[in-house]
Image (tube, rainbow, N blue to C red):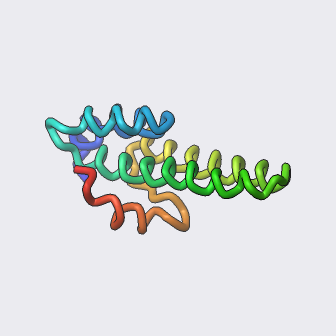
C-alpha cells in the first residue's frame, strides 16, 4: 500500500478503534475521499465492537467474575493489537476473526 494512502487514512483508522461511536465517526470521515487503509481498519474495528457487545451480552448471563474478566482481557488485547497496526500504518488483521470481518462487512466503503 502506498505511503500516501496510509498517511491520509491514518486518522480515521485510529479513531475507528475508540468505541463504537468512534467507528461510526470514522465511517463518515472516510466517505469522501474513500481510503483503502481506513476502510480496512474501520471494518476490523466495527467487527470487534459488534462482537464485543454481542458476546458481552452472552457473558452477562454467565454470572461469573472469571468469565467477565477473561472476556474483557481478550477484547482489550484484540483492540490494542489492531490499534497498534493502525498507528504504525500496517494492515494487521485481528487474530482469529480478522479475515471474517473483511468478508462480512463489505458494505463499509
Q: Residue at x 49, y 51 (%)?
A: 50
- Residue 69 x, y percent position in the rendering: 78, 48
Q: Residue at x 56, y 49 (%)?
A: 53
Tell me if residue 92 comes above or below residue 7 in the rendering.
below
Is 3 positioned to the left or the right of 21 in the image? left
Q: How many marks?
A: 0
- Residue 107 x, y percent position in the rendering: 25, 56
- Residue 104 x, y percent position in the rendering: 35, 64
- Front residue of 47/38: it is 47
Tell me if residue 20 comes above or below residue 93 in the rendering.
above
- Residue 103 x, y percent position in the rendering: 34, 67
- Front residue of 96/70: it is 70
Tell me if residue 66 comes above or below residue 103 in the rendering.
above
Residue at the left extreme of this rendering: 33
Q: Residue at x 50, y 47 (%)?
A: 49
Is 60 positioned to the left or the right of 28 in the image? right
Q: Residue at x 41, y 61 (%)?
A: 101
Amino acid at each position: 500500500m502506498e505511503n500516501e494512502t496510509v498517511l491520509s487514512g491514518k486518522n480515521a483508522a485510529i479513531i475507528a478503534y475508540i468505541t463504537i461511536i468512534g467507528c461510526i465517526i470514522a465511517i463518515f470521515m472516510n466517505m469522501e475521499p474513500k481510503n483503502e487503509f481506513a476502510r480496512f481498519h474501520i471494518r476490523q474495528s466495527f467487527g470487534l465492537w459488534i462482537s464485543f457487545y454481542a458476546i458481552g451480552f452472552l457473558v452477562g448471563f454467565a454470572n461469573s467474575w472469571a468469565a467477565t474478566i477473561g472476556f474483557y482481557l481478550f477484547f482489550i488485547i484484540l483492540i490494542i493489537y489492531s490499534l497498534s497496526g493502525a498507528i504504525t500504518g500496517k494492515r494487521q488483521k485481528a487474530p482469529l476473526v480478522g479475515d471474517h470481518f473483511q468478508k462480512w462487512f463489505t458494505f463499509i466503503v
